[in-house]
Image (cartoon, grey):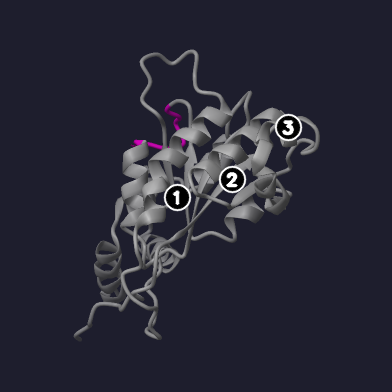
Amino acid sequence: MTSTPTPISASATTELVFILVEPARGENVGAAARALKTMGFSSLWLVNPCDLSGAARWVAHESTDILDQARLFPSLQDALAEVEFSIACSARRRLDKDDYLSPAECRQAIANKSRSVRRAALVFGRESSGLTGEELAACDAATRVPLACEQPSLNLAQAVMLYAWELSVLNTESASAAATDTALATFAHVRQALEEALQRLGVNKQENLQRWAQEGLGRFSDRDLGMLMTLLKRLP
């Protein structure tokens, strides 16, 4: 049986959203909004945030429109349901992830999926404790900033600014071509197909192999994803 590569839409660039999980200080949310607008981003999503009046608006200065347009979610799970590729930002290496992208590698990972991912997210944790292990595991990939020392770490607003600056180049990249009507081999489709294939092979979700395979997808380009989907379709 022969198979042709699964077609991927030649659509434009990926929409990038920044998700803050349970931010406790309005000043940090306002500073994050200001950083995003400065770097050309407008999509701020907040999970169970603190009060967004007062300090948040004062620090946001002329970026209060980012706060006004921010989407609110009761849980990270609800927010992730609306994105196709998510990268968790962590201040340190955690047992829940093995492969950590640098900020520059994050940019490349997202740029490489401009046709297979319509919306990607950078996920930032709480100021005091970051993301839980469950929240970290729910994201497709993880990233951390290499620092000269672990303490003091970057605060929330500083981390958002750093990643927004690194990813701002994505806003200047032009669309490759108009979208087509061909079937999409989206990142979400490939991730689901890989999970099903591993299950058929008897690989338990708790095994490291499952985690390594899913994390590895984060580094795949559109072409890699299309090739993998073709191979997965050939499996019995």
Q: Residue at point 37% right, 78% down? A: 178
Determine which quarter of the picture holds residue 234.
bottom left
Residue 90 is one of the magenta-drawn residues: no
Compared with 123, 82 (above or below) is: below
| Label located before the other in sequence (3 or 1) | 3
Circle 1 packing at 10 Å, graded few (<14), some (14-19), many (20+), is: many
Mark 2, residue position: 19
Q: Nearer the viewer, residue 52 or 218?
A: 52
Determine which quarter of the picture holds residue 133.
top right
Q: CA distance from mark 2 to mark 3?
A: 21 Å
The magenta span reads: 93-102
Q: Mark on residue 140?
A: 1
**Disc 3 vs disc 1: Cβ atoms closer than 8 Å?**
no
Q: Nearer the viewer, residue 169 or 116?
A: 169
Q: Nearer the viewer, mark 1 or mark 2?
A: 2
Q: Quadrant of the N terminus?
A: bottom left
Q: Residue at point 75% right, 30% down? A: 55
Determine which quarter of the picture holds residue 142.
top left
Whether residue 167 appears in this view of the structure is yes
Q: Amino acid at mark 3?
A: Trp
Mark 3, residue position: 58
Circle 3 packing at 10 Å, graded few (<14), some (14-19), many (20+), is: some
Q: Secondary structure at mark 2?
A: strand
Q: Secondary structure at mark 3?
A: helix
Image coords of residue 220 (percent x, y): 29, 56
Circle 2 packing at 10 Å, graded few (<14), some (14-19), many (20+), is: many
Residue 98 is one of the magenta-drawn residues: yes
